């Protein structure tokens, strides 16, 4: 006579015990995964990342030598400032993009979100509330659209490429509609001042980029969120089995990218003194290109903020050198393409040399 | 062993959710309040360019339907083209305008024009996104007996249109070049450093503008030393100008092809704190004209490329459909080609042109 029916009380206790074991197991696996990821970063991967960055630094140095040799106006304090300021807007967008790509996704909607946020923050109605509301408005629009992207991808189980492509089209459409296809001029002087302010002799826009990059670096390298992002990008299924809430983390990644776009929108409003549905055109490609030459894997799981920022600087410096030398745009585009290939090849070579 | 959630946790969680929900609602309400673009006070936006004094020709005649197709209004100038066409058509009780949604996809524009042809409109006004690509459908309309007014961007074949009306890109560049040369000579600068901010570099219209500018300068023994290309957007205007100003630490004159991107060009100049040169604009936006009138910055002049040409095109289409000629000319039919002159707008004559300025 075996006990075919268990008493309810015992069953409960057993279930609880099992749940507890599962939780403990989960916690242990998560800790292990995190530890492994951390160890990996400190060890082999960190080394590779740094060497990759050295490759980009070499490219930058070569560009600087070419610039100095071909134009007397290159190596001036004014021009270096100009290069840094020119990098600031796209740089902030690129930090957000780096997170999304490391997390195994892609965000094609960044340029459109910048445009929508810039328009929304500069309507006559928004401007009537003053500069603080304009800034908050841009950030909210960025966060809101990013959140929609994230929810659709994580909980709606849609492919990131499709969701953000849809957002690209519709956000730019909404921006054009809201602005009635006009360029909206900013009348608020305090917003325009953002572009010219330079506390401590450093342009405010560059400081914003620096702060975003540092916050991004800390988030990626020193927090659980960063570890989870890397784990999800490396192997989503393993991350899920390790007990990571993949959906929540994925949503946060796109939210983060959206907020970066909101910040970039404020910067672009100040720099151009306008809001327009044409702002941020092709930012998605610029940002993705910078992230990739910065050494981040397009398939996710590996990447650095520093590399992405260096990638942005490489592109801005190329544009600068071409204009200083009075070269035509089409030549510039050919050269940019070649330099992207050269930079990636150079990185691979330095990585391989280091490995052997 | 009973693991019901702690009441206090549940409460905090509830409060957090509530706070978050309220916050989200508040943010939503704030954002919704921010979408309006209606000015609180009386708007000083320019009215659309319409013309009502044209002798007997404007008296109501045979009722006609005019089809209208233009690129997407993603730029102040094109937006003004569409607004002007609609406003001019509204002035006539005998004109019904069928305007199709603007598109920058030539395939879509071709099928839109085909739809208008099959609706048997009495005349067509077409501003093609690309003149070459729309030529065939223009010919098709003409062969179907519908007269086509080709607006601004030229068809590859004259068979595609009954009449062409448009701006003078070469003349615009030449006018800018002449103004710059005069100003340099007046200041006694013999070897000036001249900058140029183009629009989209591979468009024929940009190349014609640059050709006119170069040739007018060459006649005075001057040349452009720094040339950059933007993309007709404010952002690119700001970007390339910021770099151009680094390339030329001292400038004497600067011509910017397009007042829409000019907002960005001027922002870059302000941010660099530069004011040692004179700047000439292009197209003639209201914003640019107001700056010229105020005479407070580097912008001293703009050479026009007036979107009022859309109003004129509607008038021409109406006359063609009603078999009338232009009353100021002797001929019984309208001319086959009309090139508009590019006016040089400076502080002295700006008041005369302000009503034609378009909102960028």
Image (cartoon, coloured by chain):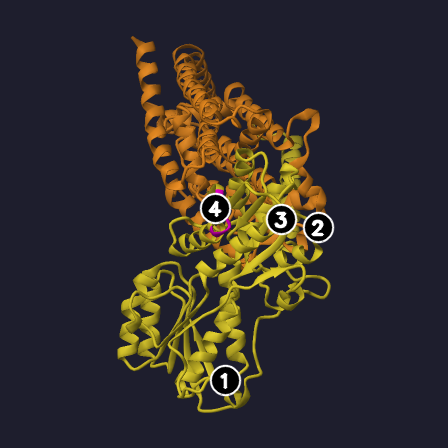
Chain colours: A orange, B yellow
Residue A199 percent location from the top left of the image: 70, 28
Q: Earlier in the sequence, mark 4 or mark 2?
A: 4
The residue under the point 60% across, 54% down is A184
The answer, for residue A299, to whether it is visible in the render is no
Residue B297 percent location from the top left of the image: 67, 48
Is residue B113 within the magenta segment? Answer: no
Secondary element under disc 4, as helix, strand or loop, is loop
Magenta stretch: dominant SS?
Answer: loop
| Chain at numbered mark 3 | A
Front position among marks 4 and 3: 4
Instruction: Identify the residue under disc 1.
Output: B328
| Chain at numbered mark 2 | B
Q: Which portion, as a residue range, is magenta? A: B219-224
> Vertical placement of A260 versus B231: above or below?
above
Q: Are marks 1 and 3 on the same chain?
A: no
Q: Give the number of the disc on residue A121.
A: 3
> Vertical placement of A69 versus A272: above or below?
above
The quarter of the rendered structure image containing the N terminus of chain B is top right
| Chain at numbered mark 1 | B
Front position among marks 1 and 2: 1
Q: Give the number of the disc on residue B296.
A: 2
Callouts 1 and 2 close, C-beta under 8 Å = no
The answer, for residue B243, to whether it is visible in the render is yes
Residue A188 percent location from the top left of the image: 70, 47
Q: Give the number of the disc on residue B230.
A: 4
Callouts 3 and 2 close, C-beta under 8 Å = no
| Chain at numbered mark 4 | B
């Amino acid at each position: 006579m075996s006990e075919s029916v268990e008493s309810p009380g015992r069953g409960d206790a057993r279930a609880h015990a099992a749940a507890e074991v599962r939780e403990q197991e989960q916690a242990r696996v998560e800790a292990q995964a995190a530890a492994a990821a951390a160890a990996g970063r400190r060890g082999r991967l960190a080394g590779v990342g740094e060497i990759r960055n050295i490759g980009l630094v070499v490219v930058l140095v070569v560009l600087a030598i070419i610039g100095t040799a071909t134009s007397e106006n290159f190596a001036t304090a004014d021009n270096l400032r100009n290069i840094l300021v020119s990098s600031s807007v796209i740089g902030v967008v690129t930090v957000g993009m780096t997170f999304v790509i490391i997390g195994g996704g892609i965000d094609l909607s960044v340029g459109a979100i910048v445009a929508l946020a810039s328009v929304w923050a500069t309507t006559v109605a928004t401007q009537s509330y003053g500069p603080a509301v304009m800034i908050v408005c841009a950030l909210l629009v960025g966060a809101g659209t990013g959140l929609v992207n994230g929810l659709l991808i994580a909980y709606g189980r849609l492919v990131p490429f499709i969701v953000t492509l849809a957002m690209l089209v519709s956000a730019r459409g909404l921006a054009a509609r809201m602005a009635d296809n006009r360029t909206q001029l900013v009348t608020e002087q305090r917003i325009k001042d953002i572009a010219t302010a330079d506390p401590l002799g450093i342009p405010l826009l560059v400081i914003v980029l620096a702060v975003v990059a540092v916050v991004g670096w800390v988030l990626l390298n020193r927090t659980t969120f960063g570890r989870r992002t890397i784990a999800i990008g490396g192997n989503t299924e393993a991350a899920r089995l390790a007990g990571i809430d993949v959906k929540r983390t994925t949503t946060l990644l796109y939210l983060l990218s959206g907020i970066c776009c909101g910040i970039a929108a404020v910067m672009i409003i100040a720099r151009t003194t306008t809001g327009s549905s044409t702002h941020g055109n092709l930012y998605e490609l610029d940002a993705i290109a910078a992230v990739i030459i910065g050494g981040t894997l397009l398939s996710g799981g590996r990447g650095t903020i520093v590399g992405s920022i260096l990638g942005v600087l490489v592109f801005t410096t190329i544009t600068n050198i071409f204009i200083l030398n009075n070269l035509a745009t089409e030549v510039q585009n050919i050269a940019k393409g070649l330099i992207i290939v050269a930079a990636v090849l150079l990185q691979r070579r330095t990585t391989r040399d280091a490995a052997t | 062993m009973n693991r019901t959630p702690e009441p206090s946790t549940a409460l905090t969680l509830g409060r957090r959710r509530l706070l978050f929900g309220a916050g989200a609602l508040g943010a939503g309400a704030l954002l919704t309040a921010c979408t309006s673009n209606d000015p609180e006070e009386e708007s000083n936006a320019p009215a659309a360019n319409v013309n009502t004094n044209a002798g007997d020709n404007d008296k109501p005649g045979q009722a006609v339907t005019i089809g209208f197709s233009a690129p997407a209004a993603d730029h102040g100038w094109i937006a003004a083209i569409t607004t002007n066409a609609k406003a001019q058509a509204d002035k006539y009780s005998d004109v019904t305008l069928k305007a199709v949604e603007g598109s920058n996809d030539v395939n879509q524009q071709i099928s839109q024009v085909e739809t208008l042809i099959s609706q048997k409109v009495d005349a067509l006004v077409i501003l093609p996104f690309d003149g070459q690509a729309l030529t065939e459908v223009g010919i098709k309309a003409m062969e179907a007996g519908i007269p086509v007014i080709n607006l601004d961007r030229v068809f590859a074949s004259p068979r595609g249109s009954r009449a062409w009306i448009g701006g003078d890109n070469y003349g615009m560049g030449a006018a800018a070049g002449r103004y710059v040369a005069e100003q340099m000579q007046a200041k006694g600068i013999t070897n000036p450093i001249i900058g140029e901010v183009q629009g989209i570099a591979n468009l024929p219209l940009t190349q014609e503008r640059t050709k006119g500018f170069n040739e007018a300068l060459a006649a005075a023994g001057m040349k452009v030393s720094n040339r950059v290309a933007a993309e007709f957007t404010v952002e690119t205007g700001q970007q390339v100008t910021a770099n151009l100003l680094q390339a030329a630490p001292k400038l004497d004159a600067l011509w910017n092809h397009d007042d829409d991107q000019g907002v960005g060009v001027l922002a870059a100049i302000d941010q660099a704190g530069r004011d040692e040169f004179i700047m000439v604009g292009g197209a003639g936006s209201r914003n640019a004209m107001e700056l010229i009138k105020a005479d407070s910055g580097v912008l001293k002049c703009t050479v026009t490329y007036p979107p009022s040409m859309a109003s004129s095109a509607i008038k021409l289409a109406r006359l063609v459909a009603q078999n009338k000629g232009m009353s100021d000319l002797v001929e019984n039919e309208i001319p086959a080609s009309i090139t508009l002159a590019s006016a040089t707008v400076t502080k002295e004559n700006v008041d005369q042109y302000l009503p034609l300025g378009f909102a960028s």
